[in-house]
Image: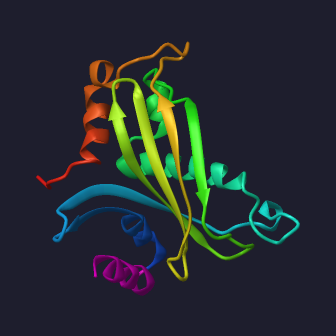
Amino acid sequence: WIETYFLFLCKYFNKRLRIYYRAAILYNDLGGFYMFYHKEYIRPRYEETDQMGVIYHGNYITWFEQARSGFFRALGYSYKQLEDEGFWLPVIEVGAKYIAPAKYDEEVYVKTSVGLCQGVKLILNYEVYDAETDNLLVTGFTKHATTDKSLRPVSLKKKSPQVYELIQDCMKKDPQ
């Protein structure tokens, strides 16, 4: 009901409220599951389609990157801030499972959440949904190393406890 309420607010007032809808903390009474996620809305462009009229598979990886940047902005800590503090998050592995195709001009959203933040490793999970039907189209992940600008591994927990705690809070099982 929370998502429905925020959608109502977005339509009733203005689209500026949509930012609150895109980044949410969920609590499910049945499973006690609590986590932060971000929704990045994307309207596929014609140039992103292939000859079959569906989104070319490689473009989903680009959408993951766009959603990852939006995820950190929604946390209140942008990629630029990380870089300004001397941290990089190079992708060391990426994967995707294609369930159904996205099509030209049919809005989708990429739901981004933290899968793991441990040592010098960060895993982000992605789910791409059709925005109109909420049908799941693609699942995926990116695995990142946390490094300094010369690509040497750096522990966020040791070098930036504030950022580390922010990311850890995204995976809490019980709300504080």
Q: Nearer the viewer, residue 127 or 37?
A: 127
Q: Which residues are magenta?
A: 1-13
**Residue 44 falls within the magenta-colored stretch:** no
> Quick one: quadrant of the N terminus?
bottom left
Could you tell me which residue is drawn at 78 percent across and 61 percent down? 48
Q: Residue furthest right?
A: 51
The vertical placement of 68 against 84, above or below, is: below
The vertical placement of 54 against 68, above or below, is: below
Could you tell me which residue is drawn at 49 percent across and 51 percent down? 70
Where residue 59 sits: x, y (%)? 71, 54
The vertical placement of 83 against 94, above or below, is: above
Q: Nearer the viewer, residue 138 or 158?
A: 138
**Residue 8 falls within the magenta-colored stretch:** yes
Where residue 148 sits: x, y (%)? 48, 17
Where residue 30 sits: x, y (%)? 17, 71
Could you tell me which residue is drawn at 31 percent across and 82 percent down? 5
Could you tell me which residue is drawn at 46 percent across and 50 percent down? 125
| Left or right: 58 as drawn, with respect to 47 | left
Task: Please identify the quarter of the rendering in which residue 154 is found.
Answer: top left
Where residue 167 sits: x, y (%)? 32, 40
Q: Nearer the viewer, residue 17 or 53?
A: 53
